[in-house]
Amino acid sequence: MSKSTSLIATSHRHTQAGFTLVEIVVVVVILSIFAGMMSLSVGSSESRKNRAFYEHLTDSLNYVRLLSAERIQPMGLSLQADKQGQITPVIVALSNPYIAYQNQDSTSSIKDSTPKNAMELSADITSMSGAASNKAPTPSWETEPEVSLPALPDGVSLSVQSLDAGGMSNTGQMQALQPWFTGQNVPQVLWFGTGQATPVTIEVRHNSRLVGEVITIMPDGSMSIGQGL
């Protein structure tokens, strides 16, 4: 083999040892496509979790409304903070709402065959509190074991906005209610056990973006999706 032929073969081997510019570009494009697919997969997973929470919430609120009316027991949705300051939605119910009637002396009770609803009963407890010889247990808001909500997904927040605007037609009635209806421990969303509820809007947001549509609790206790009063 001549010297020139040997140099050409050596040069050919050196040329095949590296990648061409076209090959590098193709590899970069393929990697970019895979990165995009992974990003879409992660985003889709978050979206599914957020949507699942939203649907679980709406289903639970519908059930709570029916359960409250069936039991004639005030119930609601409360946003509670744990020790780390994380907000957790919890379904609560008013325990012992009729305790004053249960402990009332039958001789001092007024004979009335007309059934009373939870709001009327809670208002009447004021007049009966002084008549009881022993201090009756005070009704309190307790976690409802029959209804549980999942923890808020990462980046998801829940906000409740009252639609009352401070001008309720039954302001006098609200003033007569007991502290467990007007204190700070009252759930943000409340059904009175009569079928009625405090009108509010509920928004579920993920990183400030709305998940699903705005939930509106109407004064009659019904729930509307995407519509206001």
Image (tube, rainbow, N blue to C red):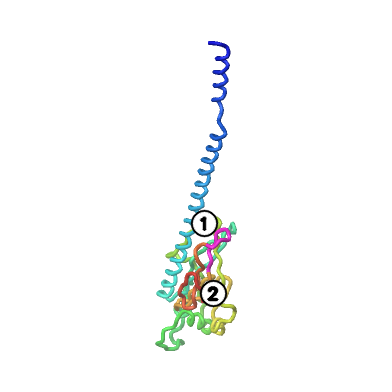
Name the amino acid type tagged 2.
Trp
Question: Badge 1 local density, few (<14 within 10 Å), some, or many (20+)?
Answer: few
- Residue 35, percent from left and from top: 53, 44
Viewed as shown, does residue 225 lie left or right of 20? left
Residue at the extreme top of the image, as rendered = 1
Question: Badge 2 local density, few (<14 within 10 Å), some, or many (20+)?
Answer: some
Residue highlighted by disc 2 = 180
Residue highlighted by disc 1 = 153
For marks 1 and 2, give the CA distance: 30 Å
- Taking the magenta stretch, the answer to whether it contains residue 127 is no
Name the amino acid type tagged 1.
Pro
- Residue 180, percent from left and from top: 54, 74
Is the residue 15 above or below the residue 105 in the image? Answer: above
Is the residue 193 above or below the residue 112 in the image? Answer: above
| Mark found first going from the N terminus, 1 or 2 | 1
At numbered mark 1, what does the secondary structure look like: helix, strand or loop? loop
At numbered mark 2, what does the secondary structure look like: helix, strand or loop? helix
Magenta region? 202-210
